[in-house]
Image: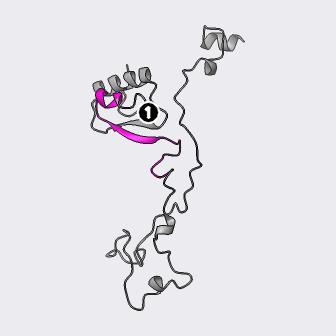
């Protein structure tokens, strides 16, 4: 009991006094049919062949004909479900925020979208965005980026 009183003078454990974060409206499990990237045929053998996917089009290509033991061809069957496409693992969609006014758009959508602060936002604007996000109860995916820890 004295351990908690030293950490938090409010007589309750510190993990109970944390502010409640917005929770996403989870309605469907996110299923990824394939998490590995599709690599181009023979890209692992030669440096001149980049790893970016290209469909093999040779008339005698073993990969194109689908011989067993060959790499998998990218196809429409590997696509994600429409309802869970582009969702993060925490069931939020991301919305890029560059200033405080962009954050106002998420006022009614805080259970569906999470704010992601753009990489080129300054420290001062970033602090203002984080403060306004706490007021609007909007989840921020990268709150610790570019934060000065001395202050």
Q: Read off the magenta span.
A: 84-104
The residue that appears at 29% across and 27% down in the rendered structure is: 101
Q: Which residue is mark 1?
A: 109
The residue that appears at 53% across and 46% down in the rendered structure is: 89
Left or right position of 101 against 55: left
Instruction: Specify the quadrant of the image occupied by residue 2.
Output: top right
Instruction: Specify the quadrant of the image occupied by residue 40.
Output: bottom left
Residue 122 in the image: state x and y as whole percent: 27, 30
Quarter of the image that includes the N terminus = top right
The residue that appears at 57% across and 41% down in the rendered structure is: 26
Q: Is residue 25 above or below residue 136?
A: below
Q: Is residue 18 above or below residue 46?
A: above
Residue 28 versus residue 5: which sits nearer the camera? 28
Quarter of the image that includes the C terminus = top left
Left or right position of 12 against 110: right
Residue 125 versus residue 102: which sits nearer the camera? 102
Query: Does the magenta-highlighted stretch encompass residue 101?
Result: yes
Residue 33 in the image: state x and y as whole percent: 55, 62
Query: Does the magenta-highlighted stretch encompass residue 110?
Result: no
């Amino acid at each position: 009991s004295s351990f908690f009183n030293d950490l938090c003078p409010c007589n309750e454990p510190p993990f109970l006094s944390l502010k409640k974060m917005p929770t996403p409206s989870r309605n469907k499990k996110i299923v990824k049919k394939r998490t590995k990237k599709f690599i181009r045929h023979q890209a692992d053998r030669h440096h001149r062949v980049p790893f970016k996917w290209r469909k093999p089009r040779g008339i005698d290509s073993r990969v194109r004909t689908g011989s067993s033991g060959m790499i998998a061809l990218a196809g429409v069957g590997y696509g994600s479900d429409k309802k869970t496409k582009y969702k993060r693992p925490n069931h939020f969609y991301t919305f890029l925020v560059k200033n405080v006014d962009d954050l106002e758009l998420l006022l009614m959508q805080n259970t569906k979208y999470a704010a992601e602060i753009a990489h080129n936002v300054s420290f001062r604007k970033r602090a203002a965005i984080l403060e306004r996000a706490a007021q609007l109860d909007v989840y921020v995916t990268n709150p610790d980026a570019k934060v000065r820890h001395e202050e």
